């Protein structure tokens, strides 16, 4: 059963990946970290807002798609919200399967879809006092496009 967690609290990637190991032949995970710069400027923080309920439902749908598209034993998405400073963990997308191919591809799918389709509002706060809302980049949309589904 896939797990989806949206919370302000930090997470332990090692502990989370270990939970996926039971009965698996492969566990794949991606941890996203807040960068220290964006657009050539020094970042003070990244602030993520969401609409409770809607966000969890959207992430659960992504996890469900991964579970049906690949032969997965389990799937996990953890996404943080609130004000995160550079170096903070922001997201964990992880999958478990009998074989590495399914786990690796499903994890790549999850992170590509999270970048474009997860309903978060992201604001970059720079050390110079300016702030800007972040939208997915063309490269994010191109990465997502490779996973266009022909079926359900």
Image: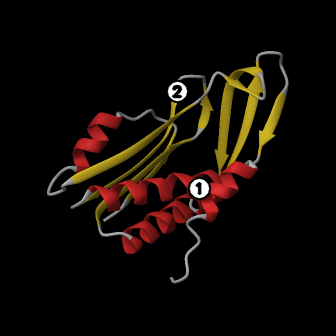
Pick whichever, 84 or 51, lies toward us.
84
Number of numbered callouts drawn = 2
Out of 43 and 140, give the one closest to the viewer: 140
Name the mark nearer the viewer: 2 or 1: 2
Neighbor class of circle 2 (other Cα within 10 Å; few <14, some 14-19, many 20+) is some
SS category of the residue bearing label 1: loop
* Residue at disc 2, secondary structure: loop
Instruction: Check if mark 2's residue and mark 1's residue have beta carbons within 8 Å.
Output: no
Apparent side of residue 43 relative to residue 95 in the rendered image (left or right): right
Q: In the image, residue 44 lies at what x, y percent?
A: 70, 20
Where is residue 101? Give x, y as percent: 33, 59
Looking at this view, name the residue that lies furthest to the top.
128
List x then y, in percent, for residue 151: 52, 83
| Residue placed furthest toward the left | 23
Note whether 106 is above or below 77 in the view shown: below
Residue depicted at 29% across the width and 43% down the height: 17
Quadrant of res 76 = bottom left
Tell me where residue 74 appears, x and y as whole percent. 29, 60
| Residue of label 1 | 52
> Which residue is painted at 67% across and 25% down in the image?
45
Q: State the residue at coordinates (19%, 56%).
A: 24
Q: Quadrant of the N terminus?
A: bottom left
Q: Which of these two is toward me, 7 or 66? A: 66
27 vs 3, nearest the viewer: 27
Q: Which residue is mark 2?
A: 88
Disc 2 from disc 1: Cα separation:
22 Å
Q: Is residue 119 visible?
A: no
Mark 2 or mark 1, earlier in chain: 1
Q: Is residue 60 left or right of residue 134?
A: left
């Amino acid at each position: 059963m896939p797990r989806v967690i949206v919370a302000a609290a930090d997470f332990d990637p090692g502990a989370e990946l270990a939970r996926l190991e039971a009965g698996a032949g492969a566990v794949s995970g991606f941890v996203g970290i807040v960068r220290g710069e964006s657009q050539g400027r020094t970042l003070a923080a990244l602030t993520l807002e969401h609409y409770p309920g809607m966000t969890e439902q959207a992430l659960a749908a992504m996890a469900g798609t991964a579970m049906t598209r690949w032969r997965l034993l389990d799937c996990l998405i953890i996404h943080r919200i609130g004000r995160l400073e550079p170096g903070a963990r922001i997201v964990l997308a992880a999958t478990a399967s009998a074989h590495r191919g399914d786990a690796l591809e499903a994890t790549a799918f999850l992170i590509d879809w999270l970048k474009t389709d997860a309903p978060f509002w992201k604001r970059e706060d720079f050390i110079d006092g300016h702030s800007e809302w972040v939208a997915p980049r063309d490269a994010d949309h191109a990465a997502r496009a490779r996973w266009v589904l022909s079926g359900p």
